[in-house]
């Protein structure tokens, strides 16, 4: 039976920069999938592109690609990534320049997938009867239209499959569903149709398991003492068979752990009902069976699928005011009592908590993340002050200047964080989830001079 090996080398923009090279050099793989996008990332990239039109994609991708592109071309490993951000065309130009610089331009065929970016057509969509209502609050998008920073539909695997069929060996997308970059090569290699629901569901389960990188190979794992080492953490691989069954594993001699429990924790990460909605299929996560096949090998079977949902999810970001935070370290005897005195003095100088839309302070190291875990107080706490307000100037003139003066103006054993200095207000980017009709979104694939509507 034909087997396909897909390697993930990152779960977010900023993940381990050595992972792509280690995945390519660690053993045989057929595809390398690279994930860079989160909801807030799209807004940041949109703002970046507004300042510099040639940008709008994660620049780290190019350094990662430089590490692996020659080896991937030589070994026939195809690369699929959502690193196009809000400017896949600009990203393609940078990749072509890199390939030319590496002397392999004649062996690199770049395909890009467009269609997810709805930012420029929002007004047309609203006027055509697409309300883009907030799925959580029921609020109409028209109420905050002027504040919108980005709008991207989660599109599925069809465009990537088309690019693979046309021979692309580097495929760059914008906001596709996270699991789509892994599902697409399975559809292409095994000939799964767009209505082969059970097989598509298996591909979604596989893609979902590896989409967060080492979170399925022992990272962020509840039973962390079972992980023998976190050094050189092994990023995940899936070995997929034509019937949709697959094994989750990692390269030999790498850190981490692949067990039924590490995989199960990732399966339930960021899902609601067991009927997991994606652009390509509704995958039934409650039908899946996990079995420990061997050391660092978990076999996954039993995925079942249902027809894809009628609408697509849209990730919209918008401006929602300003925020700032500052930190002071309080140490020595009676650290908690001193920290409370510092907080009291600070808020008095900053105008009081009621002067801001939102305001709080926390004692990191004691009660910031959860209730105190010990009866005795800590030897030091980090006091964090934070505010949020619609008035940027208020934060910068009333809140920010009052952090550092507390060092000489309150208790002994106190200092500020050396590389932080005076806080400054930064923009709050809020998330607006919505739905849009499928016929309002058209995928396009561009390879060379070809522009194909999907």
Image: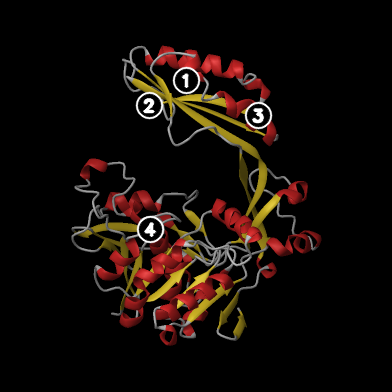
Q: Earlier in the sequence, mark 1 or mark 4?
A: 4
**Residue tagged 2:** 365
**Does residue 451 show up?**
yes
Badge 1 or badge 3: first in the primary sequence: 3
Apparent side of residue 283 relative to residue 374 in the rendered image (left or right): right
- Which circle, 3 or 2, is nearer the viewer? 3
Q: Quadrant of residue 430?
A: top right
In the depicted view, which residue is nearer to us: 403 or 378? 403
**Residue marked by disc 4:** 209
Crowd class of label 1 (few under 14; some 14 to 19; many from 20; radius 10 Å): some
Of callouts 2 and 1, which one flags the residue occurring earlier in the amino acid sequence?
2
Q: CA distance from mark 4 to mark 3?
A: 47 Å
Relative image position of residue 252 (x, y in whole percent): 20, 63
Q: Is residue 432 above or below residue 398?
A: below
In this rendering, the answer to whether 398 lies above or below 340 is below
Q: Secondary structure at mark 1?
A: helix
Q: Is residue 216 left or right of residue 442?
A: left
Residue closer to the observer: 81 or 297: 81
- The reply to whether discs 4 and 2 touch (Cβ–Cβ < 8 Å) is no
Measured in 3D between alpha carbons, the distance from the residue under mark 4 to the one under mark 2, in whole angstroms, is: 32 Å
On residue 397, which mark appears?
Answer: 3
- Residue 449 in the image, given as x and y percentages of width and height: 59, 86
Label 2: how many residues lie within 10 Å, few (<14), some (14-19) or many (20+)? some
| Residue 169 visible in the picture | no
Residue carrying label 1: 407
Q: Earlier in the sequence, mark 3 or mark 2?
A: 2
Q: Are marks 2 and 1 in contact (CB under 8 Å)?
A: no
């Amino acid at each position: 039976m034909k087997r396909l090996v897909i390697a993930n080398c990152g779960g977010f923009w900023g993940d381990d920069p050595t992972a792509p090279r280690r995945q390519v050099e660690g053993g045989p793989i057929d595809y390398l999938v690279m994930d860079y996008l989160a909801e807030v990332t799209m807004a940041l990239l949109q703002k970046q592109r507004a300042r510099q039109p040639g940008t709008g994609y994660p620049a780290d991708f190019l350094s990662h690609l430089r590490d692996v592109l020659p080896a991937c071309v030589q070994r026939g490993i195809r690369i699929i990534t959502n690193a196009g951000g809000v400017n896949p065309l600009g990203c393609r130009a940078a990749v072509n320049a890199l390939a030319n610089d590496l002397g392999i331009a004649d062996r690199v065929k770049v395909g890009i997938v467009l269609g997810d970016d709805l930012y420029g057509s929002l007004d047309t969509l609203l006027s055509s009867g697409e309300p883009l209502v907030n799925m959580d609050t029921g609020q109409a998008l028209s109420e905050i239209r002027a504040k919108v920073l980005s709008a991207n539909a989660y599109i599925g695997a069809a465009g990537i499959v088309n690019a693979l069929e046309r021979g692309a060996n580097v495929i760059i997308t914008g906001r596709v569903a996270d699991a789509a970059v892994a599902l697409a090569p399975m559809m292409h290699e095994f000939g799964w149709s767009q209505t082969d629901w059970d097989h598509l569901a298996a591909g979604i389960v596989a893609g979902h398991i590896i989409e967060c990188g080492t979170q399925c190979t022992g990272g962020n794992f509840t039973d962390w003492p079972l992980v023998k080492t976190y050094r050189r953490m092994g990023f995940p691989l899936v070995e997929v068979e034509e019937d949709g069954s697959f094994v989750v594993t990692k390269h030999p001699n790498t850190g981490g752990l692949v067990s039924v429990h590490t995989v199960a924790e990732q399966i339930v990460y960021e899902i609601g009902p067991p009927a997991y909605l994606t652009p390509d299929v509704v995958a039934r996560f409650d039908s899946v069976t996990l079995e420990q096949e061997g050391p660092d090998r978990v076999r996954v079977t039993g995925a079942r699928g249902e027809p894809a949902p009628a609408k697509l999810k849209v990730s919209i970001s918008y401006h929602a005011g300003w925020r700032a935070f500052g930190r002071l370290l309080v140490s020595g005897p009676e650290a908690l009592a001193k920290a409370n005195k510092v907080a009291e003095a600070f808020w008095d100088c900053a105008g009081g908590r009621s002067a801001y839309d939102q305001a709080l302070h926390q004692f990191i190291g004691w009660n910031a993340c959860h209730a105190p875990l010990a009866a005795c107080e800590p030897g030091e706490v980090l006091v964090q002050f934070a505010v949020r307000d619609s008035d940027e100037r208020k934060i910068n003139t009333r809140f920010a200047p009052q952090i550092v003066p507390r060092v000489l103006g309150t208790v002994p054993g106190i200092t500020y964080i050396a590389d932080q200095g005076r806080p400054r207000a930064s923009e709050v980017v809020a998330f607006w989830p919505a739905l849009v009709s499928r016929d309002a979104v058209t995928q396009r694939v561009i390879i060379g001079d070809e522009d194909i509507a999907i």
